Image: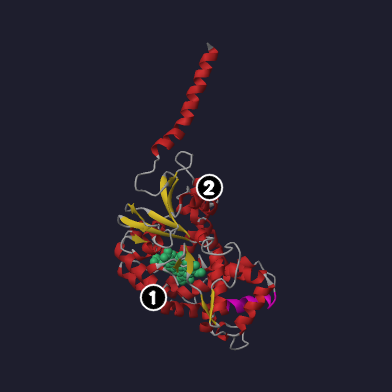
Amino acid sequence: MALELDAQAIISALVLASLPFILHQILVRHRPGDPPLHKGWIPYYGVARELDQNPEKLLARLHKKYGDIFDVWTNGARMTICFDILEAVPSMYRNTKQMDFHDFEVRLHTPVFGYPVEYRDNPDLQKEIHDLTNVYSINTDNVKLMTEEFTVAFDKLLHQSIREKGTEFVTDMRDWARYLMYAATCKALFGQHFPAEEEQMFRDFLAWEWDFVNMAKHKPMKKIQKGWDARERIFKRISEDMAVNEDKVTDFIKTRIQIHKKYGYDPTSRGFASGMLQLIFAGTANTLPTSFWYLSIALSDPRYTKMLRERIALYVKSDELSSASFDYHGLTNDPILTSFFSEVLRLKASIWGFRLCIEDAILPVGGKEYFFKKGTTIWVPVPIVHRDEEIYEKPQEFEPNRFLKVEDGKMTKKVMFKKNGKLTRLAHLPFGGGKSMVL
Ligand code: HEM
């Protein structure tokens, strides 16, 4: 009798334990007309763990299995993944009325950048700020001005380092390069007076950035306390600086201040500081890793170092250790140097493209059409596109001349690559596309 009861209890426990798995299989289903669905076997979480730990490995495997578009089930929701650079991605970039980059970013405003809710929820103010930011940071002419400010700051910071450490010194390249890029970017964006050299502020920026993903995932306070406190100190420092240096800022920030005042926000306000933090992030999130990898790869092989040195030497105008000694236009347009740079970005940019459907939308993929409801985000795993062997020969290898085109003895930058026999510009996507493309 006791044995029978035990057996019954075990069976009931097994049925109960397997219930969530059975329900996951029954309830999470592919809907007709949707892309294929990979739901994994773990109830609710689906493939969340694999996606967190090694997204590239998982998605490259699923790409082979399902093709250029599919959904994965993660943390109780579908996530749409798209690799179709011939049809879908260009259509996403063009369709700015229905699909947007910025609207997704807005979801990070309060949890990550610390926007006060009433500041975030002021659509007219936010639109004006966003339009202004794009004019100043991704419009070519203004980027030139910002680059000039950047080089002025960079020279000063470099000379300061040399004064303190001498012309030859051993350093942790990652930290040093990060600091220089961070400080010069802050000064280029806000003005040369900006206190970016202060160690505390730099440390706080790194501590906040470390918790970025946890904040975006709304993790509990105990997990994000360090980043949270660091962000508070950054806000305080920005407000203190604005209280005394409002008149020293760049034209960009002057206009930003005017817009804020129009809506009742002082430059010492928390709203203003949170927007500034987002700007620092936008300006450094990609440049820091890119410059680190550029230097690491350049120094990893003596042939690369020699080739880059010789090529850069063509654009040196004087011996002075300053950015002004270089012919900037020549440097940034040299096909050999830009090919090297593009190849660094191809292999090392860990960027994902995404667009949020701000209206119901239809997307053509590989000759079929898929319908997406308003609110769906479509993700493009750029690192996997950049390693697609149908596009790039030996995609895992660093090939400095991959983006070099030589025709009739003339060198230019190669921008077109073939996928499925068709030529496309979108095989290389480090800067995004459409109206929010950075370069
Ligand atoms: C290696 C350098 C950089 C890379 C690889 C990079 C990459 C990107 C990418 C992929 C996007 C999303 C675009 C899209 O999906 O269409 C983006 C957006 C943006 N980037 Fe960059 N970026 C870089 C440097 C910068 C710098 C230096 C600034 C400013 C000083 C900047 C400011 C912005 C802004 C403001 C946006 C948002 C545009 C919008 O909301 O429409 N970026 N960046």
- Residue in the image at 30% along x and 70% along y: 262
Relative to 357, 49 lies left or right: right
Residue depicted at x 39% and y 41%: 29
Badge 1 amino acid: Lys
Element type at mark 1? helix
* Residue 233 drawn above or below residue 305: above
Q: Residues within 10 Å of mark 1 (few under 14, many from 20)?
A: some
Image spot of residue 139 (x, y percent)? 40, 75
Query: Can residue 115 be spotted in the picture?
Result: no
Between the residue at mark 2 and the residue at mark 1, the CA separation in whole angstroms equals 46 Å
Amino acid at circle 2: Glu
Q: Is residue 305 left or right of residue 390?
A: right
Sequence order check: which comes first, mark 2 or mark 1? 2
- The magenta region covers 156-168
- For label 2, the crowd category at 10 Å Cα-Cα, with few meaning under 14, some 14 to 19 and many 20 or more, is some
In x, y percent, where is residue 364?
36, 58
**Pointer 1: what residue?**
254
Kindly identify which numbered label has been placed on residue 50. Answer: 2
Residue at the outermost bottom position: 318
